[in-house]
């Protein structure tokens, strides 16, 4: 079996008309103006109201028409903004279609950087060609950016290297809803894209910082898996911490990757978390590789003074481009 075909990030080439016909798009009200949309690929977050549609991630290109039809059942307002939580194509595949429709695509600097050039997802030996210009984020940021739409304050914040080096979380303040992107795979072992600057320590650190900001009424939209809450995110962080510690102990004892996998460091959690597309042995190896190859110097930090500045890519007021 060709590995990319069983990979939940999917294959843009293999995901054709036949697969599109089999996908059902569902919208679940979450709180306030916020909804969660599921189909094929990463979970989509939506803020729907008189100010227009604010969208978090957009799945695969062949699904755009179905996604738009589902949104149209909730509102006749256009999709104004699309936030990409990271660069993977099961979260950005619809960018080209929505960009052509006039939606403004927004993401961290590193998302545009990776989407602008050919990439390789090393763990799955998958080459990803550069995206066309219309699919690229036209507004990028360093630390974060805030939107004021549909009666809510929507804070988009970059986190240090975790799933990738361009991760952002989206906090709908009034609705009390957090969209984590792929920092959080609910009910399954996550994919850590070490080749894109990802880090198991980074995911754990991000989760540990997010959990205290939530309360018992908070709702959490994960990158993959069902809608959950503070307790669900906390349990995920505890699972990752335990497995990370197990693998770290084996590394300190001099174990090779093969020996780490053979030691079954995930075993205590496999029944609950090991039935997704990342299998226990794969995840053990992934954690090993992450610990052995941490992000160099955490170079995600930007220079002081301009770290939080927004950058516009495209045509500037003077008609020039950048």
Image (tube, rainbow, N blue to C red):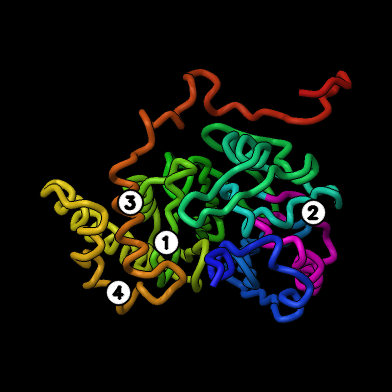
Residues packed near mark 4 inside 10 Å, few (<14), some (14 to 19) or many (20 plus): some
Residue 270: numbered disc: 4
Find out whether residue 192 is within the magenta segment.
no
Tell me the CA gap for discs 4 and 1: 13 Å
The range drawn in magenta is 54-82
- For residue 5, say whether it is visible: yes
Give the structural element (helix, strand or loop) at label 1. loop
Which numbered disc, 2 or 1, marks the residue closer to the eye? 1
Q: Residue at x 76, y 77 (%)?
A: 18
Mark 4 and mark 1 lie on one chain; the one further toward the N terminus is 1
Residues packed near mark 2 inside 10 Å, few (<14), some (14 to 19) or many (20 plus): many
Give the structural element (helix, strand or loop) at label 4. helix
Mark 3 and mark 4 lie on one chain; the one further toward the N terminus is 3
Which numbered disc, 3 or 4, marks the residue closer to the eye? 4
Q: Mark 1 points at which residue?
A: 190
Residues packed near mark 3 inside 10 Å, few (<14), some (14 to 19) or many (20 plus): many
Residue at the limit of the structure toward the front, as seen here: 1
Q: Where is residue 102 in the image (x, y as percent from the top left)?
A: 85, 48
Tell me the CA gap for discs 3 and 2: 33 Å
Q: Position of residue 157 (x, y in %)?
A: 52, 42
Q: Which residue is drawn at 73% across and 37% down?
A: 138
Give the structural element (helix, strand or loop) at label 2. helix
Which numbered disc, 4 or 2, marks the residue closer to the eye? 4
Q: Mark 3 points at which residue?
A: 204
């Amino acid at each position: 079996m060709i590995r990319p075909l069983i990979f939940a990030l999917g294959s843009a080439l293999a995901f054709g008309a036949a697969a599109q016909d089999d996908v059902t798009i569902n919208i679940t009200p979450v709180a306030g103006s916020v909804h969660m949309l599921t189909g094929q690929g990463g979970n989509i977050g939506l803020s729907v109201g008189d100010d227009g549609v604010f969208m978090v991630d957009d799945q695969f290109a062949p699904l755009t028409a179905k996604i738009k039809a589902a949104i149209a059942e909730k509102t006749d307002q256009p999709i104004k903004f699309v936030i990409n939580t990271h660069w993977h194509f099961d979260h950005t595949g619809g960018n080209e279609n929505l960009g052509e429709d006039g939606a403004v695509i927004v993401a961290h600097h590193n998302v545009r950087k990776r989407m602008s050039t050919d990439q390789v997802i090393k763990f799955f030996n998958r080459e990803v060609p550069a995206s066309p210009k219309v699919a690229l984020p036209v507004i990028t940021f360093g630390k974060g950016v805030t939107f004021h739409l549909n009666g809510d304050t929507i804070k988009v914040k970059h986190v240090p290297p975790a799933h990738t080096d361009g991760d952002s979380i989206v906090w709908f303040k009034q609705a009390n809803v957090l969209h984590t992107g792929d920092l959080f795979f609910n009910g399954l072992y996550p994919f850590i894209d070490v080749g894109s600057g990802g880090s198991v320590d980074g995911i754990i650190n991000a989760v540990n910082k997010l959990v205290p900001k939530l309360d018992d009424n908070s709702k959490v939209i994960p990158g993959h898996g069902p809608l959950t809450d503070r307790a669900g995110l906390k349990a995920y962080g505890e699972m990752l911490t335990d497995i990370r510690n197990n693998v770290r102990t084996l590394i300190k004892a001099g174990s090779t990757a093969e020996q780490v996998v053979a030691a079954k460091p995930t075993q205590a959690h496999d029944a609950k978390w090991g039935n997704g597309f990342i299998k226990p042995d794969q995840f053990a190896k992934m954690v090993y590789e992450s610990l052995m190859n941490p992000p160099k110097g955490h170079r995600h930090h930007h220079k002081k003074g301009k770290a939080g500045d927004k950058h516009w890519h495209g045509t500037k007021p003077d008609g020039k481009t950048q």
